[in-house]
Amino acid sequence: GDQRTELPSVISLQTPYPNPFNAQTNISYSIPFAMDIEIGVFDIQGKKIKVLERALKSIGHHKVTWNSDGIISGTYFIKIQDEGGWMKSQETKVILVK
């Protein structure tokens, strides 16, 4: 069947698009049931520099946009985790080029 219509069994985080990016990038993710999630941006030292989303989200596929205003060029990591810590967190690398 079409992968987009199947319900996810784990938290999954797609590679941001575009990547590398200049001004903004889109992050698609899926969650297996309704949960409080946080999506954060971390620098190369592992310091959280921005929270893109912190909310109770419904089961299925979602998307969030990172607008990089005020952020310098470099390599960053997008990380998604559920607030309860039930599910394994996922992260992906993104490169910002200004």
Image: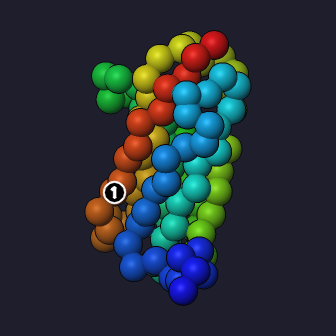
Helix, strand or loop at mark 1: loop
Vertical order, 38 against 68 (above or below):
below
Pointer 1 residue: 89
Viewer-closest of 6 and 36: 6
Location of residue 40 with respect to 31 vertically, above or below: above
- Residue at 68% over, 32% down: 24
Q: Is residue 62 above or below residue 90?
A: below
Q: Residue at x 29, y 63 (%)?
A: 88
Q: Residue at x 54, y 14 (%)?
A: 73
Residue 34 visible, this orientation = no
Q: How many marks?
A: 1
Q: Quadrant of the C terminus?
A: top right
- How far across and down, in percent of the image, does residue 18 sit? 62, 37
Which residue is nearer to you in this view: 87 or 11?
11
Q: Amino acid at mark 1?
A: Ser
Q: Is residue 61 left or right of residue 41?
A: right
Q: Residue furthest bottom?
A: 1
Quadrant showing the N terminus: bottom right
Name of the residue lying farthest toward the front: 1
Q: Is residue 2 left or right of residue 42?
A: right
- Residue 81 at x, y = what percent? 40, 57
Camera sees residue 28: yes
Determine the image quadrant of residue 46: top left
**Where is residue 57 drawn, in percent x and y?**
59, 69
Q: Is residue 15 left or right of residue 68?
A: left
Colour scheme: rainbow
Categorize mark 1 by other alpha carbons within 10 Å: few (<14), some (14-19), many (20+). some
